[in-house]
């Protein structure tokens, strides 16, 4: 639960770290965790101005590092733990798109997406997992995507990572079970964020026609799933993929 650095007193509320936690689904998740009583830290990659505005608005401390860089993850988590205490809930939300048809995709577009979306999850989980094992508690929630389940034109790189996260998480769930560490994925549908804002409007209009609920998700609707899976009471839920997609992909 963490100890106050100055008073040495035990602090209430588990410590939660959200990567990519200052914008979009990550920001909504960080805010929802705070509202649910967690002590929250939000990581961000590079947009310092937006991150500082988020911190000023919410009171959630923000920490900059690149999740694709293992040494940066180790240093970043050390800073979070010095400020708040050991990370008990990790939400691997940081993700990028570099959409292109495969016949136009560069090796750099492939690599970059793999390094952030999948490599970032490995780096972050690897950094916190030993502490979780020692403390015999952990909640790991990895942000996949409906497109990792269904596929999407222009996203061979992105969907490879989002499907990969599901396999990674299932294996981690099995490894963590005996130490009360759960690992689950959330597969959001198209959500009202800057990432979806980059989809060409005519393509997005077409996609929306395939969503039975007929609209984008709000980031808060995805965050609701995180709160559900992060709870102490969710200790028997592990290895699942929670779809929140408005009916776009029903499996
Ligand atoms: N479904 C079916 N066909 C599609 C399609 C779609 N969603 N999008 C494009 N196509 C088709 C086009 O009709 C075209 O077909 P033909 O070759 O037969 O004419 C072909 O794919 C190529 O289209 P373009 O000429 O437009 O090719 P382009 O190279 O200019 O752009 C693209 C292709 C990059 C894929 C562009 O269409 C695009 O950005 N699409 C959006 C991809 C997408 O949905 N990304 C999701 C981002 S949000 C996210 O990832 C969050 C999440 O988890 C949900």
Image (cartoon, rainbow, N blue to C red):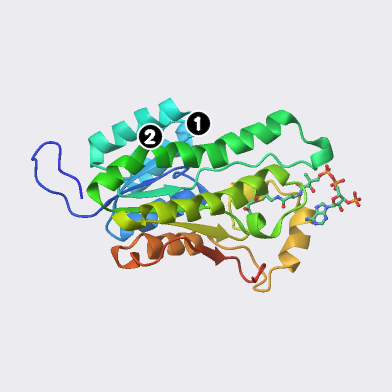
Return the residue found at the far right. 103
Quadrant in the picture for residue 33: bottom left
Identify the residue at image location x=34%, y=35%: 77
Q: CA distance from mark 1 to mark 2?
A: 10 Å
Quadrant in the picture for residue 189: bottom right
Residue 53 seen anywhere in this rendered image of the structure: no
Q: Position of residue 174 (x, y in %)?
A: 42, 56
Q: Position of residue 39 (x, y in %)?
A: 27, 49
Q: Does the beta carbon at disc 1 come under 8 Å from ligand 1?
A: no
Decide: few, some or many residues near mark 1? Use Cα within 10 Å; few <14, some 14-19, many ≥20: few
- Residue picked out by circle 2: 63
> Which quadrant is the C terminus positioned in?
bottom right
Q: Between residue 220 and residue 250, name the one nearer to us.
A: 250
* Horizontal relation, residue 51 to residue 128: left or right: right
Return the residue found at the far bottom. 212
Identify the residue at image location x=50%, y=57%: 185
Q: Between residue 173 and residue 203, name the one nearer to us.
A: 173
Q: Between residue 48 and residue 207, name the one nearer to us.
A: 207
Q: Secondary structure at mark 2?
A: strand
Q: Position of residue 237 (x, y in %)?
A: 40, 66
Q: How many marks?
A: 2
Q: Does the beta carbon at disc 2 come under 8 Å from ligand 1?
A: no
Mark 2 or mark 1, which is nearer the start of the sequence? 1
Identify the residue at image location x=23%, y=41%: 85
Indicate which disc residue 46 carries: 1
Quadrant in the picture for residue 42: top left
* Rendered view: 236 above or below 14: below
């Amino acid at each position: 639960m963490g100890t106050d650095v100055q008073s040495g007193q035990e602090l209430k509320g588990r410590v939660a770290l959200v990567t990519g936690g200052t914008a979009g689904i990550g920001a909504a998740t960080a805010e929802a965790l705070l509202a649910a009583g967690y002590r929250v830290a939000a990581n961000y990659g590079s947009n310092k101005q937006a991150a500082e505005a988020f911190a000023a608005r919410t009171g959630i401390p923000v920490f900059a590092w690149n999740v694709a860089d293992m040494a940066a993850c180790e240093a970043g988590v050390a800073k979070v733990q010095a400020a708040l205490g050991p990370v008990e809930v990790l939400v691997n939300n940081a993700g990028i798109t570099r959409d292109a048809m495969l016949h136009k995709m560069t090796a750099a577009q492939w690599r970059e997406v793999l390094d952030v979306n999948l490599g970032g999850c490995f780096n972050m989980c690897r950094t916190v997992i030993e502490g979780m094992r020692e403390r015999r508690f952990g909640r790991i929630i990895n942000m996949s995507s409906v497109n990792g389940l269904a596929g999407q034109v222009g996203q061979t790189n992105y969907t490879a990572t989002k499907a990969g996260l599901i396999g990674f998480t299932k294996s981690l769930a099995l490894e963590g079970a005996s130490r009360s560490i759960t690992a689950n994925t959330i597969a959001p549908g198209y959500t009202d964020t800057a990432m979806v804002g980059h989809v060409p409007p005519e393509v997005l209009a077409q996609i929306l026609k395939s969503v039975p609920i007929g609209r984008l998700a709000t980031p808060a609707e995805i965050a609701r799933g995180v709160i559900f899976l992060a709870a102490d009471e969710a200790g028997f839920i592990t290895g699942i993929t929670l779809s929140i997609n408005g009916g776009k992909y029903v499996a």
